[in-house]
Amino acid sequence: MKVVALFGSPRANGNTATLAKTFNKTAEDLGADVQTFFLNKLDAKGCQACDACKTKTDHCVIKDDMAKVLESVKNADVLVAATPIYFADISAQFKIFVDRCYSYLEPFETIPKTSRLKTGKKFVLITAQNRGEDMFAEVCTKYRMIFEFFGFQETHLIRGCDLRETDALKTKNRQDLIDLSKEAAKKVVKPVG
Ligand SMILES: Cc1cc2nc3c(=O)[nH]c(=O)nc-3n(C[C@H](O)[C@H](O)[C@H](O)COP(=O)(O)O)c2cc1C
């Protein structure tokens, strides 16, 4: 099983990164092949709305670092996306990826709009925020819907709330979130052997 993990925070050892690393470690222990991308380090443009992925090719034609990410996610069984909540939404680094996923869709003349992705792909969304859990749940709902539209069939949400301090999660007493990340990995990765 191939897992691709996108780290959407500029903080390489922050809350979302800690949860994503926990997920990845459990997945690897279960035999998964895990590939990670730190989106903040990529040289990547947003979607240029050129529509070449609809009129000329079946993929995004922008030749930058995101092209490799799009190809890897296309070939993966599981996508893990870890993003802090920035002003009631995902990080800009992750949003660039989301918009480039437009290339995963068939031309809009195809009704209903269909995905170019193989069936059975799973999506794990990890978020972290300062505010309590009553705030920004709709962000997860929105991106669950968007990734289902892209062709992902099973979504697992891990929401880190009340993370007010800047220390990495692992230095704090949030075993509940660490456990949730391990459990999610066990659910999506089939043990080998
Ligand atoms: C630019 C910016 C905007 C933020 N906006 C919000 C927000 O709207 N709501 C919130 O609860 N936290 C907000 N935060 C706090 C982060 O979401 C929070 O610290 C999170 O745990 C950071 O995750 P990370 O350690 O993975 O980077 C913001 C932080 C930054 C830097």
Image: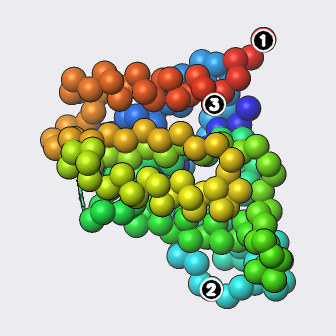
Label 1, residues with CA under 10 Å away: few <14, some 14-19, many ≥20? few
Residue wearing tag 2: 49
Residue under the image location 62 percent in, 35 percent down: 34
Label 2, residues with CA under 10 Å away: few <14, some 14-19, many ≥20? few
Residue under the image location 76 percent in, 43 percent down: 120
Label 3, residues with CA under 10 Å away: few <14, some 14-19, many ≥20? many
Give how far apart the Cα atoms at labels 1 and 2 are. Answer: 45 Å
| Element assignment for label 2 | loop
Amino acid at pointer 2: Ala
Residue 188, label in figure: 3
Q: Quadrant of residue 31?
A: top right
Give how far apart the Cα atoms at labels 3 and 1 are. Answer: 16 Å
Residue 140 position within the rendered picture, expressed as x and y whole percent measured from the top left: 44, 53
In this picture, residue 47 sits left or right of residue 174: right
Q: Residue furthest top?
A: 193
Q: Quadrant of the C terminus?
A: top right
In this picture, residue 13 sits left or right of residue 156: left
Residue under the image location 31 percent in, 21 percent down: 175
Observer able to see residue 44? no
Between tags 3 and 1, which lies in front?
3
Q: Residue furthest left?
A: 165
Point out the tag, 3 or 2, that comes first from the N-terminus.
Answer: 2
| Element assignment for label 1 | loop
- Give 1 or 123, whichever is nearer the viewer: 123
Residue wearing tag 1: 193
Point out the tag, 1 or 2, that comes first from the N-terminus.
Answer: 2
